[in-house]
Amino acid sequence: MPVALLLAYDGTDFRGYQRQSAAHGLTVQGVLETALQRVCGAAVATAAAGRTDAGVHAQGQVATFTPPLTRHLSPAEWQRALNAHLPASVAVRAACEVVEGVHARTSALARAYRYRTLVAPVRDPLRERYLHRVRQPLDVPAMQQACKTLVGEHDFAAFGHSPWDIPGEPKRSTVRALHRAEVTPHGDEIWCDFAANAFLTGMVRRLMGVLLLVGAGRLSPAQVGEILAARRSEHLGPAAPACGLCFMQVTYPAGTLIWPADII
């Protein structure tokens, strides 16, 4: 029976989630599939809900796989066995069995990300691995106003490209439904939460880069709408650093994945 894994990882030292050749560096999928091979005694392919970029973290990534017929483990045994073979920067938070046909990516209804920004004139070595620091205060109400422009179904071509584009072939759709874009102060941090049916490659970091420009007074909320409508990236500025971004949660149809109560 197929198995789903709920993964958390510190993405700092990874070249992203998706498996690449060894010459390109360590990936989360690579170390996960290596651990599965050690547990199962054979190569096992996995699918993930999202392809996080290099340096991006996760606490709610989901991966699915079908174990060999000769390997029968309970969800708790899968969790223990894989965690014994994974590096300290990756953990299986939970495991559960799923019915045939459930796929981490194609069965998902929505994904959610959080970007954390620290507002402080002096660096904070104990936190900056997991957030992005700015020196000057940000205009949170202006950032909140800009978010209202972004919510809804739009063509987000200015903010990224489809992860499924193939060189030499027609570009795939860049239309996405952004269900949530919220900016909330939390002490000396500002949290920006995004949820959508799916995200383009680099989309959240580019959205965040624009919001940081708005917060710094270098763009107006109205200009964000103009960038979105123009579908061009000339005025975006740099994408926000990967360190502040965390893949928080994946939503599936009710009853598809059932995690332990203390995980949810």
Image (cartoon, grey):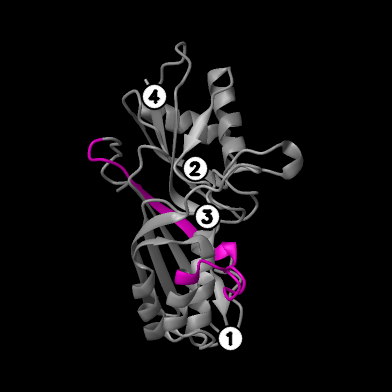
Left or right: residue 100 versus residue 253 is right
Please report whichever mark, 3 or 4, sits nearer to the chain's N-terminal start. 4
Is disc 2 in contact with disc 1, using a CB cutoff of under 8 Å? Answer: no
Q: Amino acid at mark 4?
A: Pro
Q: Which mark is residue 121?
A: 1
SS of the residue at dot 4?
loop
> Alpha-carbon distance for marks 1 and 3?
24 Å
Q: Magenta span covers which residues?
A: 229-255
- Mark 2 and mark 1 lie on one chain; the one further toward the N terminus is 2
Residue 44 against residue 226 in the figure, above or below: above
| x 62%, y 38%: residue | 19
Q: CA distance from mark 4 to mark 1?
A: 49 Å
At 65% from the left edge and 49% from the top edge, which residue is drawn?
15
Q: Which residue is mark 4?
A: 2
Disc 1 is placed on an element classified as: loop
In magenta stretch: residue 136: no
Estimate how packed mark 4 is, as few (under 14), some (14 to 19) or many (20 or more) residues with alpha carbons within 10 Å: some
Asked which secondary structure carries label 2, the reply is strand
Label 3 sits on a secondary structure element that is strand
Residue drawn at the location 40% of the way across and 78% of the way down: 146
Amino acid identity at mark 1: Pro
Q: Which residue is mark 2?
A: 91
Q: Which residue is mark 3?
A: 57
The reply to whether dot 4 and dot 1 touch (C-beta < 8 Å) is no
Horizontal and vertical percent position of residue 99: 31, 25
**Mark 4 or mark 1: whose residue is earlier in sequence:** 4
